[in-house]
Image: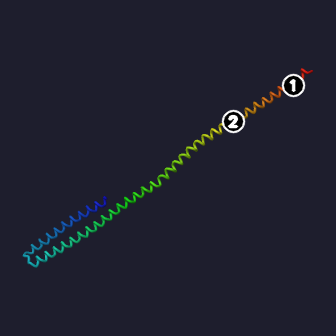
Amino acid sequence: MKFKTMMQTEMQQEEAGEGLQSVAQSGQISESLSLSGALTKEDEEMATSALSTFMAKEEEIQKRKMEVQERVLAQLGRIEQENRRLATIREELEALADPRKKEVTLVQKKIDAVNKELKTLGQTCQKKEREYKEALEAFNERNKEKVELITRLMEVSTRVLFVEQF
């Protein structure tokens, strides 16, 4: 849009400058004719003819300028429409890709959460295994002691019974 308004402003400035030039030139023609003295009808007709030819050419130039300006503005309008269309398409593509990204992100977060839980559970499991082994060792030691004590008790009771029999 900025380019469009800049082009219009520039064209208007050029038109104003050319209009001033044409007025100045026509004034110069009439001044040079009046300086030469009496104008003959033929000179006057030539001046009028030259002036009308000049004006016709100037109008032709103006028409062409306007046609070019209109074509440029029309193309700029089409370009702007296509840019808007491309922006819309780009947004639609991002919207299509976005749900997948969200889903992937959710799954990654769930995986991270499960990994954290597994890490703590693994540490707890190792700790419990160590405690279990220690408790099992203690149990086995006590059981050995019990067996030794029972064996000793049996020996002592067998001795007592043996001694009482004799």
* Label 1: element kind: helix
- What residue do we see at 83% from left, 28% from top? 151
The residue that mark 2 highlights is: 132
Q: Amino acid at mark 1?
A: Thr
- Marks 2 and 1 close (CB-CB < 8 Å): no
State how many labels appear.
2
Vertical arrangement, residue 85 with respect to residue 52, above or below? above
* N-terminal label among 2 and 1: 2
Left or right, 102 with respect to 129, comes to left
- Identify which residue is drawn at 19% across, 66% down: 19
Horizontal and vertical percent position of residue 153: 82, 25
Q: Position of residue 162 (x, y in %)?
A: 90, 23
Q: Residue 158, which numbered label? A: 1
The alpha-carbon separation of the residues under discs 2 and 1 comes to: 38 Å
> Which of the 4 quarters of the picture holds residue 6?
bottom left
Q: Tell me the amino acid under the disc marked 2.
A: Tyr
Q: Looking at the picture, does residue 109 appear above or below residue 133? A: below
Closest to the observer, 40 or 69: 69
Secondary element under disc 2, as helix, strand or loop, is helix
Q: Residues within 10 Å of mark 2 (few under 14, many from 20)?
A: few
Q: Nearer the viewer, mark 2 or mark 1?
A: 1
54 sits to left or right of 72: left
Q: Which mark is residue 21?
A: none
Residue sitting nearer the eye, 74 or 41: 74
Determine whether, in the image, residue 59 is placed left or right of residue 82.
Answer: left
